[in-house]
Image (cartoon, rainbow, N blue to C red):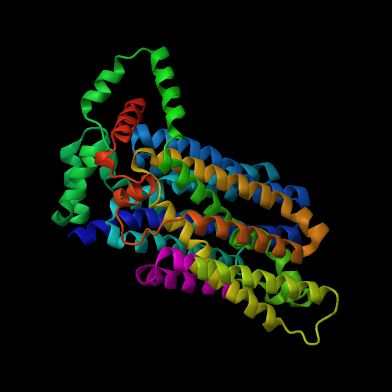
Amino acid sequence: MEFIGKCFVTSGVTLNMLTHGFMYGFNTGLFAQLRKTKEIQLDLELESWLASSTSLSFIVGSLFSSIFMDRFGRRPAFIIASATMIISWLIFIAAKSFTALLVAKIFQGFSAGVESTTGYILVGEYVSPNHRASFLASFQPVMLFGDFITHSLSSICDWRNVAIILAFFSIPGLALIVFSPESPSFLAKIGMHDQCKKVFYWLRGPNENNEVEMLIKTNLPSKQNAINNDKINGYKKVIHKLSFIGTFFKKREVRISLFIMVHMQLINLFSGSILYDSYTVDIHTAVFGTDKDQYMYLIVMYLDIVRILSSIFSVFLTQKMKRRSMLLSLVGLNILMYLLLGIYVLCKNHNLLPFDHISIGIILYGFNYFSLAAGSVSLPNIVAGEIFPLANRSACGMICNITFSLYMFVNIKNVPYIFSGAGVSGVFFMNAALLSYALGMTMYTLPETKDKTLLEIEHILRGCPIADDDETMINLKEHNETNF
């Protein structure tokens, strides 16, 4: 019964993650077709704004979800995000100007920001430690499958028709999340302890009773905290919240987890998946040759299949390998492939290759996509669902997503100009350098999280058990009171 419960609640989140793949993959067909048809006039500057605008609204979505889900719950926040994504496809269908396209992309970024903040937290709180990594890792192949669907549709359909199809594909995710229960952690937090246990046992069965009892005892307030907090006047409440912000960054577990995730988000972004989806034509031309444009969609779909299979493979790897071992080997391979691709494109541009064939670029990019899908993209998402302290998960998730959005905006907005100045090979070398730095910092600070409960991971980061840490208990109480 509990397995059915896990599959039901995670399938709602997972199907909404499918729309993330739709969002990123849609750029490829949209830009390629508009460059040819000129139906809506776009220059380099306007294209860069369309490609990067989602990252700015992503920040707004992250801020909104962090505040909203702490007060009203994870599930309502996710419902809003899912509905917003469907609205964005309807705007694309009716779009006749750059402004309409931009508004649609802004809606998509907002939706992705909310879902990225709440989705990983929801699954981390729904699922037991033994299965948590597999469920979290499943998000990546699902998003990539969405990418593949969009690329496949773009090869045979006009971009408006693609938007119509994707709007229909987005509806089941909204329906499932509407009928899913609220997170046990949030139910315990607002004092609904009986409902918390009911949902917890439905999801995990009676074998993990100790965890739900510890969750209620050490992390979450009673209803009386909310009642008492309602009696505090506005001025004192503001002072109380400001004092909490002051103590937030003093917590060792917060500082370390944020440091880890800031660098893992660097790995996520500069692994190159979003870059390729945003500027497919430019990278395709540099790596595979200007005379091979007729093969673009075939190569794109081949790379999508490599990513999907690699991300599925990562689900099994997470059960066999430790997180740090996966990180070192797969991100290391990602770095190596970028160096080889940079050298290949540089030599190609200066006619220094004794032999050249399209298969060389396909093989190099295939290994690059294997490394990023199996490790560089999937691991940051897995660790994000494990590493943040329970009392501050939403705030940490918000900061993490804002950081990623800023990385993405600066990168995607300026990449066309880097292409013009340093060429595609320069971007490859830049990615390799940034990945090397981020990998070194992450390996230095990341503890092993495989098969550990969220409380055990927090124990490692803090250095003492939650129940024995009086200062942390005080901070937990203050945190919970500020959110009512």
Q: Give the range drawn in magenta.
A: 301-327
Q: Can residue 27 be seen in this view?
A: yes
Q: Which residue lies furthest to the bottom in this view?
A: 355
Q: Nearer the viewer, residue 482 or 172?
A: 482
Magenta span contains residue 307:
yes
Q: Is the magenta stretch mostly helix, strand or loop?
A: helix
From the viewer's perspective, is 100 left or right of 378?
right
Residue plotted at (42% across, 64% down): 323
Which of the 4 image quadrants contains residue 37? Answer: bottom right
In the rendered view, does 24 fall on the left or right side of 383?
A: right
Vertical order, 388 against 432 (above or below): above
* Count of picture labels: 0
Identify the residue at horizontal 71%, vertical 50% (top origin): 48
Most foreground residue, 468 or 58: 468
Image quarter for residue 38?
bottom right
Q: In which quarter of the image is the N terminus?
A: bottom left
Q: Please indicate, yes or no, whether residue 43 appears anywhere in the rendered image.
A: no
Quadrant of image for the C terminus: top left
Which residue occupies 54% across, 70% down?
371
- x%, y% of residue 183? 29, 44
Q: Position of residue 139 (x, y in %)?
A: 42, 60
Q: In the picture shown, does residue 484 fall above or below 25?
A: above
In-front residue for pair 310/325: 325
- Residue at horizontal 62 percent and vertical 48 percent from the top: 407
Q: Where is residue 45 in the image (x, y as percent from the top left)?
A: 76, 48
Drawn side of residue 452 relative to residue 201, left or right: right
In which quadrant of the rendered view does residue 318 lie?
bottom left
- 21 drawn magenta: no
